[in-house]
Image (spheres, rainbow, N blue to C red):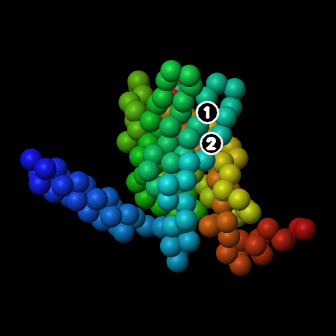
Amino acid sequence: MEAKQAKDNTWRELEAAKKKLNTDYGADAAFYGLIGATLEFADKEYTYKLNAFNDVLQTKPGHSSNLGRWKAWAGKNVMLFDGGDRCWGSPDRSTRVTVICGAENQLIDVQEPNKCEYTMKLRTPAACSQEALDALRVGA
Ligand code: MAN
């Protein structure tokens, strides 16, 4: 029995390691440092939680909805999470996170432009390239 448990644990660890290695962490794997990070944004009703490369949650006391699970990059600067909780009369909940160059990891905006389709903006050093910095400098 113990041997079976050890085998199951090892198998789980292996699957987790495979998943980690098969994830696309962006150009030059710049977003690798976000693994395990949880970024939060509170609006009037909900606290939104972005668990990088994992899932997105919309929470309020006693309740949590899944707004999508990590799917893929939808373009260079957009993280797509889909297959979240069902939404009556609309596609299952999904979230697009636009990443913007900034000094710290910080979720700065959450919107729901269409029912159960969420958009977020994430500031992160991982999105900083010389090109991104040059673009920020324009007009400064
Ligand atoms: C909840 C939240 C909202 C969403 C509605 C849809 O209230 O998840 O963001 O628009 O459900 O019914």
Determine which quarter of the picture holds residue 123. Answer: bottom right
Q: Residue furthest left?
A: 1
Q: Is mark 1 within 8 Å of ligand 1?
A: no
Query: As rendered, which of 21 and 131 lies closer to the eye?
Result: 21
Q: Which residue is depicted at the point 52% across and 77% down?
A: 28
User: Label 1: how many residues lie within 10 Å, few (<14), some (14-19) or many (20+)?
Assistant: some
Query: Considering only order in the chain, which callout, 1 or 2, is on the residue closer to the N terminus?
Result: 2
Residue 80 seen in render? yes
User: Label 2: how many residues lie within 10 Å, few (<14), some (14-19) or many (20+)?
Assistant: some
| Numbered badge on residue 47 | 1
Query: As rendered, which of 60 and 72 lies closer to the eye?
Result: 60
Disc 1 marks which amino acid? Answer: Thr
**Residue 24: x, y in percent?**
43, 67
**Residue 55: x, y in percent?**
45, 46
**Residue 114: x, y in percent?**
55, 35
Distance of label 2 from label 1 (alpha carbons): 7 Å
Disc 2 marks which amino acid? Answer: Glu
| Numbered badge on residue 56 | none
Q: Secondary structure at mark 2?
A: strand
Q: Secondary structure at mark 1?
A: strand
Q: Which residue is depicted at the point 11% across and 54% down?
A: 3
Q: Indicate left or right for 48 with 74 as reference.
A: right
Tag 2–tag 1 contact (CB < 8 Å): yes
For the image, the number of numbered tags is 2
Q: Indicate left or right for 108 with 68 as reference.
A: right
| Numbered badge on residue 40 | 2
**Residue 23: x, y in percent?**
40, 64
Residue 113 seen in render? no
